[in-house]
Every structure is written in C-alpha cells, then in structure tokens.
Amino acid sequence: MHVVELEGVGVRVVGKSLLDAVDWQVDYGDHWAILGPNGAGKTTLLSLASAVRHPTEGTVRVLGHQLGRVDLRELRRHIGLVAASQRLIDEELMEEEGATAHTVVLTGHTGTSVPLWESYGESEKERALRLLSDLGCKDLADRPFRVCSQGERARIRVARALMADPAVLLLDEPFAGLDLPAREDLIAAVEDLATTRPVLTTVMVTHHLEEVPATTTHAMLMRDARVLSAGPASEVLTSENLSECFGRPLHVDRLDGRWYARAVRP
Ligand SMILES: Nc1ncnc2c1ncn2[C@@H]1O[C@H](COP(=O)(O)OP(=O)(O)OP(=O)(O)O)[C@@H](O)[C@H]1O
C-alpha cells in the first residue's frame, strides 16, 4: 500500500485544467519536495493528498482509501497539513483568546481551532511540550502565540500538525515570509524529524530549490497542470530539468546535501 497514489488524475474547473493526467506514488518514509512556477498546480495536488478535494477524473488513494468511497473527515485525522490557507481560519481565534504556543499545539490533538480542555490529559500536555522541544521551540511553551515571530509560528504549526500523530505530513510553502535564520531553523527541524521519525512520510511544496531539505528523497517538478518529472531527488533536481520547469537556463549545484539554483549568464 502507498501513502498517496494518483492514477490518471485530472482536476478541472469551468474552462480550466488545474491538474492533467497526473500519476504519482508516495511510499512510507518518503520525503518529497514539489517545485514549479506559480499556478503550476502544486497546491491543487496537495489538496488531493490531504483529502480536501476530489479529482474530476482518475483515482486518488490516500493511506489505502480511495477518495469518493471514504469519509474524508475520518481520513484527514491521519494527515497532518500545514498550509498558509488554513492560517487565517484556525489561528485568528486562538490569537484573540491569547492562546499560548503550548495551547496551539494541544489543539492539534482534537483538530479544533479552540482548545477542548476536557480532551487533554497529562500525557497530551507532556506530548505537546515534547513536540515543541523537537521543533526547537521548547522555550516558547508559555508565550502567547500572538506575539511569536513568523519563524516561531512556522515551527509551532508543524508541532501542532504532529500532535495528531499523522502518518503523513504535508507542508504547503512552509517557508513563505521567513527570514534566512528562521528558514534555516525550520529546514533543520524538518531534517531532524526525518531522522527521529523514520516512518513519517512528508510532502513539501516550495518555490525555492534552496529550501529543499537535505533529507528529501524524492522530487516532483510541475508546470502547467502537469508533472514534468518525478522520482529520486538527485535524478529530478538537475540543471536541465529545472531549466525546463522554470522556463529559463538555470544551473543547479549540490552542497552538503542541499540544492542551489542560479541563472546561467549569457
Ligand atoms: N477554483 C478555481 N477556479 C479557477 N481557477 C483555479 C481554481 N483553483 C485554482 N485555480 C487556478 O489553477 C492554477 C493552479 O493553482 P495552484 O494553487 O494549484 O497552483 P500552485 O502551483 O500552487 O501555484 P502557486 O505557486 O502560485 O501557489 C492557478 O492558475 C490558479 O489560479
């Protein structure tokens, strides 16, 4: 069984194809990075993998369950999603209520945007603290989420997503708006997760090759609603493939396991 499996998948809205003829398999313990220009279809792909939407055609299976034949809410309990689009809905309430970072992580246990205190025992409270510590933000436990920096919030969000002990963690542009140290802290935290949780599968959407963690095992390049290339990261993230994907000559370097891209000068 695959964690995520797409066969001949298309997603269409009136007059527009958001995904076209996509085949994809994610296995347990894989760490995928998905790259592509704006509008390529990356977020649409994640919305299928996170059981948020159905395909217009083809088959999507997540954790062995075919979308369309399963209770999506039940399935979503096993999927950790950190997406910019969720932020406004989930976090505004908690900010207004003055919730601490620890409380925000606890709400991941119930999958709610307000804390349900009767559902949290000592073991959940300790687990939330441990997750904050795993993400390198132990000292933030009692700090109001409202005052946490963007970089701290990004790591708290990952801790919250892990609170439900998901089989797969989906990260949609987790580095958006982070400065360099905050970006590097989050990359280090994601790399640590790959070491400390070998069975956790991750899929990350990002715009920048520099943000791809060294622990990434597989990559997909998307363009115009289609998959341009997908497979082992070292085979996919080449100068030739990246140049085709972003539509200009790029040179790709690899250093200490990370990837870097720059434009080829004429
Ligand atoms: N409901 C919709 N109706 C019409 N067009 C849509 C709809 N949802 C998405 N799109 C369009 O489909 C395309 C793919 O969107 P998607 O968000 O998947 O791209 P993306 O690769 O994540 O882009 P970005 O890097 O800019 O976030 C975009 O051009 C977007 O405007």
Image (spheres, rainbow, N blue to C red):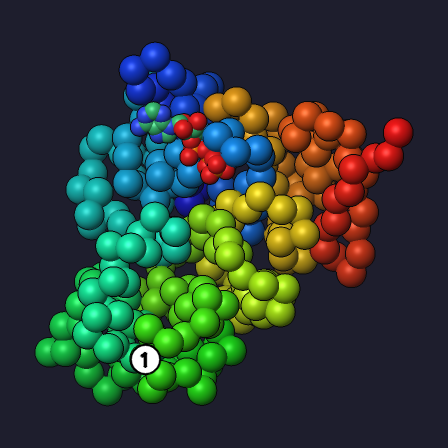
Return the residue nearer the eye: 197 or 94: 94
| Extreme residue in the left direction | 118
Q: How many marks?
A: 1
Which residue does the image show at 46% across and 59% down from the upper left?
A: 200
Q: Tell me if 118 is positioned left or right of 204 in this view.
A: left
The percent coordinates of residue 191 (x first, y second) are: 59, 64
Quadrant of res 189: bottom right
For residue 131, above or below residue 204: below
Residue 40 visible from this viewpoint: yes
For residue 106, above or below residue 244: below
Quadrant of res 237: top right
For residue 105, above or below residue 53: below
| Extreme residue in the right direction | 266
Which residue does the image show at 70% across and 33% down from the upper left?
A: 242
- Quadrant housing the N terminus: top left
Residue 218 visible from this viewpoint: no
The percent coordinates of residue 82 (x first, y second) are: 39, 55
For residue 236, above or below residue 75: above
Return the residue nearer the eye: 17 or 146: 146
Which residue does the image show at 52% across and 33% down from the upper left?
A: 38
Residue that carries the numbered disc 1 in the rendered image: 144
Return the residue nearer the eye: 235 or 137: 137
The percent coordinates of residue 97 (x first, y second) are: 19, 74
- Quadrant housing the C terminus: top right
Instruction: Determine the quadrant in which ligand 1 lies.
Output: top left
Which residue does the image show at 21% across and 70% down from the upper left?
A: 96
Q: Secondary structure at mark 1?
A: loop
Q: Amino acid at mark 1?
A: Pro
